[in-house]
Image (cartoon, rainbow, N blue to C red):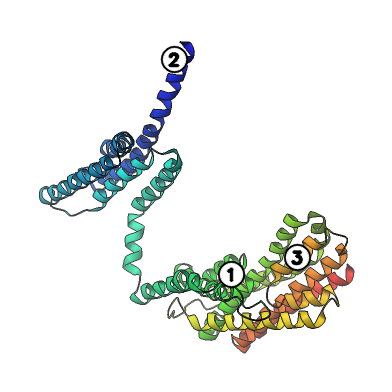
């Protein structure tokens, strides 16, 4: 009997658990809705207690549907939706205002309560409840954003979504050339990346100004692709001469971010290679940071008033995509020509397109007797140097001569530091 009693008690708590989660979800959303009503000093039809009951109603409906059939929850939801509609009409008539947000939030709370019934979707319900509450809480910020956004920015946001979320998934994800290197989806992914960095940079400039905006863009973009940042900044420098100093700073920051990223990749794959690689990577990072700080101290000469055109410019991204595809093809042909002539030649060629792939490959290979650690360190450094040279070439080709020369003043010492480190190794 004691065992049966304990089992019954455990079963009762298990049955109660979804309803407890439902109460917390309703309380979370209801607290935000009631706080909003108190802030406006207005009456409302749904507050903290109402939302708790709504969420509980959703959970109870799902529970009863599991016993009496799925049609039960359909009828319950339809009845509740009608009740909400009637309540909204009464609110609009008696209170003299139209606020559909709370009514929609009530329907969402019912659905989240229904999700709590299943253990597989309970955590999803909690996560969605947090997101819903956050969306409700940023009302003022959202309204200010809508007030200041321009029609061109809205249209360009749709274009960005079209490029990233519509075209990209439709492209084939397999090579279309006989050498097996020209993957349309991977190439278009670089187009999306360049466009996205430019898109983010536009709004960073609007929010923080040219100097801080481009610097933030460079730091964030460098975590993903410093080459893409160089392409984007070159386009900005060509279009707006006044942002050249800020664009140079952004490219420098992005390039300096690349070297710690290489160290992190090596640390994850082959920790024995981390310490030997620390000298060349730290040398190039140190020189770049020093030059960036020197530029930062002269920031009073930087003009920050920029006439922004639009956040989405596809032309620079398409040019970079074509350049990326060309480098991939040339790299493959050069690799075939070199054969097994040496790891250094492969690193020089691979660094033209991507430094991460060659870094991971050599770090993995260095764990075997096939590749000496010293050779791997030197080869990875050469790949980083080659990639830095590619970015320098991009600043001249896609940017302006002034922009390219300013970047060269910083990149040449960085490259020299890397070569000296290789000689020391």
Q: Quadrant of the C terminus?
A: bottom right
Chain-order first, disc 2 or disc 1: 2
| Cβ atoms under marks 3 and 1 closer than 8 Å | no
Residue at 56% of width from left, 84% of height from top?
A: 319
Q: Mark 3: which secondary structure?
A: helix
214 displayed left or right of 396: left
Find residue 309 and report its image quarter. bottom left
Residue at 18% of width from left, 44% of height from top?
A: 83
Residue at 58% of width from left, 68% of height from top?
A: 221
Find residue 58 and report its image quarter. top left
In three-dimensional space, the C-alpha distance between marks 3 and 2, rounded to whole angstroms, equals: 61 Å
Q: Is residue 171 above or below residue 259?
A: below
Q: Seen from this angle, which residue lies furthest front?
A: 69
Mark 1 is surrounded, within 10 Å at the Cα level, by few (under 14), some (14 to 19) or many (20 or more) other residues, namely many
Q: Is residue 272 above or below residue 249?
A: above
Q: Seen from this angle, which residue lies furthest left?
A: 93
According to the image, label 1 marks what residue? 218
For residue 5, which numbered disc appears in the image? Answer: 2
Chain-order first, disc 3 or disc 2: 2
Q: Give the total of numbered labels.
A: 3
In three-dimensional space, the C-alpha distance between marks 3 and 1, rounded to whole angstroms, equals: 27 Å
| Cβ atoms under marks 2 and 1 closer than 8 Å | no
Mark 2 vs mark 1: in front:
2
In three-dimensional space, the C-alpha distance between marks 2 and 1, rounded to whole angstroms, equals: 64 Å
Mark 2 is surrounded, within 10 Å at the Cα level, by few (under 14), some (14 to 19) or many (20 or more) other residues, namely few
According to the image, label 3 marks what residue? 361
Question: Could you say where residue 301 lies in the image, as x and y percent from the top left?
Answer: 57, 78
Question: Could you say where residue 382 lies in the image, as x and y percent from the top left?
Answer: 79, 73
* Observer-nearest of 394 and 105: 105
């Amino acid at each position: 009997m004691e065992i049966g009693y304990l089992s019954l008690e455990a079963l009762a708590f298990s049955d109660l658990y979804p309803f407890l989660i439902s109460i917390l979800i309703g309380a979370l959303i209801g607290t935000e809705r009631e706080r909003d009503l108190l802030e406006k000093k207005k009456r409302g039809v749904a507050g903290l207690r109402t939302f708790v009951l709504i969420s509980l109603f959703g959970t109870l409906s799902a529970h009863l549907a599991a016993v009496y059939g799925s049609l039960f929850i359909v009828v319950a939801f339809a009845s509740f939706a009608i009740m909400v509609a009637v309540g909204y009409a009464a609110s609009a008539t008696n209170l003299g205002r139209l606020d559909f947000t709370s009514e929609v939030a009530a329907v969402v709370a019912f659905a989240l309560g229904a999700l709590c019934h299943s253990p597989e979707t309970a955590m999803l319900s909690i996560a969605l409840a947090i997101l819903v509450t956050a969306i409700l809480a940023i009302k003022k910020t959202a309204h200010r954003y809508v007030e200041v956004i321009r029609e061109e920015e809205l249209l360009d946001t749709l274009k960005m979504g079209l490029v990233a979320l519509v075209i990209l998934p439709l492209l084939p994800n397999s090579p279309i050339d006989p050498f097996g290197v020209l993957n349309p989806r991977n190439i278009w992914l670089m187009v999306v990346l360049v466009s996205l960095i430019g898109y983010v940079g536009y709004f960073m400039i609007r929010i923080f100004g040219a100097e801080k905006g481009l610097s933030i863009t460079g730091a964030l973009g460098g975590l993903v692709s410093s080459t893409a940042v160089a392409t984007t900044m070159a386009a900005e420098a060509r279009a707006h001469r006044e942002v050249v100093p800020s664009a140079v700073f952004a490219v420098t920051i992005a390039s300096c971010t690349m070297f710690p990223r290489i160290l992190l990749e090596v640390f994850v794959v082959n920790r024995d290679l981390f310490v030997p690689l620390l000298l060349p990577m730290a040398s190039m990072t140190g020189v770049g940071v020093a030059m960036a700080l020197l530029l930062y101290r002269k920031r009073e000469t930087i003009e920050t008033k920029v006439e922004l055109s639009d956040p989405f410019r596809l032309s620079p991204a398409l040019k970079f995509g074509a350049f990326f595809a060309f480098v991939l093809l040339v790299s493959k042909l050069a690799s075939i020509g070199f054969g097994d002539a040496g790891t250094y030649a492969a690193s020089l060629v691979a660094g033209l397109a991507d430094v991460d792939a060659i870094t991971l490959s050599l770090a993995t290979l260095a764990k075997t007797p096939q590749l000496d650690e010293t050779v791997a360190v030197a080869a990875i450094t050469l790949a980083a140097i080659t990639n830095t040279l590619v970015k320098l070439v991009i600043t001249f080709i896609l940017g302006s001569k002034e922009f390219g020369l300013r970047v060269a003043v910083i990149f040449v010492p960085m490259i020299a530091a890397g070569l000296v480190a290789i000689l020391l190794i």
